[in-house]
């Protein structure tokens, strides 16, 4: 009986949290500026957003425009929905500055993609669906904050995944080490995942999140922490560009880092469903594909882990349409895919660095 009450309480708590995290837009909210202002105040309270009076009026103007956009899109017959999330009083320009890893910029500076092998080329008949979360190869959703370090988060998903598959241990690894110590990239100003993979290989591995915690800002490299690696890799490989079939073969074997164009307003407010909205191929964001599948109506999708916290999207994830007409994939997701290679054993961790999840 007591266990039943505990279970009921847990269910009610989950429902309460779900309701608290969703703020529906009604026709009544849109009826007047006064009603929209009340909606804005409820949104600010929910997200604990503090503004001074002058800034508050500007932010309300932005919020109002975003509310109308979200409401308009949600009334259309699209396979995805939008919501008033934590980005609701940011312009799209501000939003892009918030997370941008400037991947296309860094690709131009570095030059052409490196030539690598593709070990998964011979994967025949990949399964119809894969979800590495269910295999325990993906850590919880993280939050990059106001720092363009998504390249580090994307890289870490790949390394955490291959380490789990090779060793059986899921270890949360340090994005901050990459932000502070990886000099081919520029920390909160962006970078490339392949540079980060090479750094981890050359420096003898990467340490844990607990040992070198994330601060969402650029810092000085802590050599003592950097020199206490717990997970090693032996390099990386690039997935053949503009080939979703090759990408599917790679994801069938391990989580894969990708770049995408995340600049669209629909992506800013994505809530649920299979995203099929407008976006280009100006790659500006690093994420990771951790699986794929097909909906009951036959829509194919990728399971993408983001680094904007659990309050965005489907508990921090987005399902993106797979098998689109464009060779580069939706939002350019098949243009810059890469994954780590691991054949060697991990070093014995120093006391206090073990961080199994």
Image (cartoon, rainbow, N blue to C red):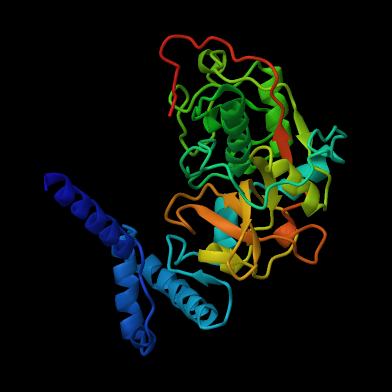
In the orientation shown, which residue stands out farthest toward the left?
1
Q: For residue 298, which quarter of the picture?
A: bottom right
What residue sits 66% from the left and 17% below the top? 203
Q: Residue at x 49, y 39 (%)?
A: 216
Q: Residue furthest bottom?
A: 31
Q: Which quadrant does the C terminus fall into?
A: top left
Q: Position of residue 8 (x, y in %)?
A: 20, 55
Residue closer to the observer: 338 or 282 = 338
Residue 269 seen in the figure: no
Q: Is residue 66 above or below residue 253?
A: below
Instruction: Report the residue at 77% width, 53% height from top.
Output: 244
The x, y position of residue 208, in whole percent, is 49, 24
Q: Quadrant of residue 40?
A: bottom left
Q: Is residue 41 left or right of residue 180?
A: left
Q: Determine which quarter of the picture holds residue 184.
A: top right
Residue 178 falls left or right of residue 59 = right
| Residue 131 visible to an observer of this rendering | yes
- Residue 266 screen position, x and y as percent: 57, 69
**On screen, residue 267 above or below 226:** below
Left or right of residue 14, residue 305 in this image: right
Residue 150: x and y in percent read 59, 44
Q: Is residue 168 above or below residue 32?
A: above
């Amino acid at each position: 009986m007591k266990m039943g009450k505990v279970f009921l309480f847990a269910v009610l708590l989950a429902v309460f949290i779900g309701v608290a995290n969703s703020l529906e837009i009604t026709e009544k909210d849109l009826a007047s500026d006064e009603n929209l202002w009340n909606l804005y105040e409820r949104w600010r309270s929910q997200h604990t957003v503090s503004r001074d009076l002058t800034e508050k009026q500007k932010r309300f103007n932005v919020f109002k425009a975003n509310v109308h956009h979200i409401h308009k899109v949600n009334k259309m017959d699209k396979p995805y929905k939008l919501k008033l999330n934590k980005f609701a009083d940011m312009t799209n320009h501000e939003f892009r500055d918030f997370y941008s890893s400037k991947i296309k910029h860094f690709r131009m500076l570095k030059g052409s993609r490196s030539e690598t092998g593709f070990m998964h080329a011979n994967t025949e008949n990949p399964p119809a669906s894969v979800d590495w979360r269910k295999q325990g190869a993906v850590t919880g959703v993280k939050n990059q904050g106001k720092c363009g370090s998504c390249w580090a988060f994307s890289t870490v998903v790949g390394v955490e995944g291959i380490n789990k598959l090779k060793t059986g241990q899921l270890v949360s690894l340090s994005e901050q080490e990459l932000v502070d110590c990886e000099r081919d990239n520029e920390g909160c100003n962006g970078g490339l995942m392949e540079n980060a993979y090479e750094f981890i290989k050359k420096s003898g591995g990467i340490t844990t999140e607990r040992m070198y915690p994330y601060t969402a800002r650029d810092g000085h490299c802590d050599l003592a922490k950097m020199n206490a690696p717990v997970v090693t890799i032996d390099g990386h490989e690039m997935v053949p560009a503009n080939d979703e079939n090759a990408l599917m073969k790679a994801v069938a074997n391990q989580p894969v880092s990708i770049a995408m164009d995340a600049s669209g307003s629909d992506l800013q407010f994505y809530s649920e469903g299979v995203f099929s909205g407008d976006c280009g191929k100006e790659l500006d964001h690093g994420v990771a594909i951790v699986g794929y599948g097909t909906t009951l109506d036959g829509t194919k999708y990728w399971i993408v882990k983001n680094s904007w916290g659990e309050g965005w999207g489907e508990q921090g994830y987005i399902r993106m349409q797979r098998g689109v007409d464009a060779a580069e994939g939706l939002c350019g997701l098949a243009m810059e895919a890469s994954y780590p290679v691991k054949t060697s054993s991990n070093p014995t961790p120093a006391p206090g660095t073990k961080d199994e999840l």
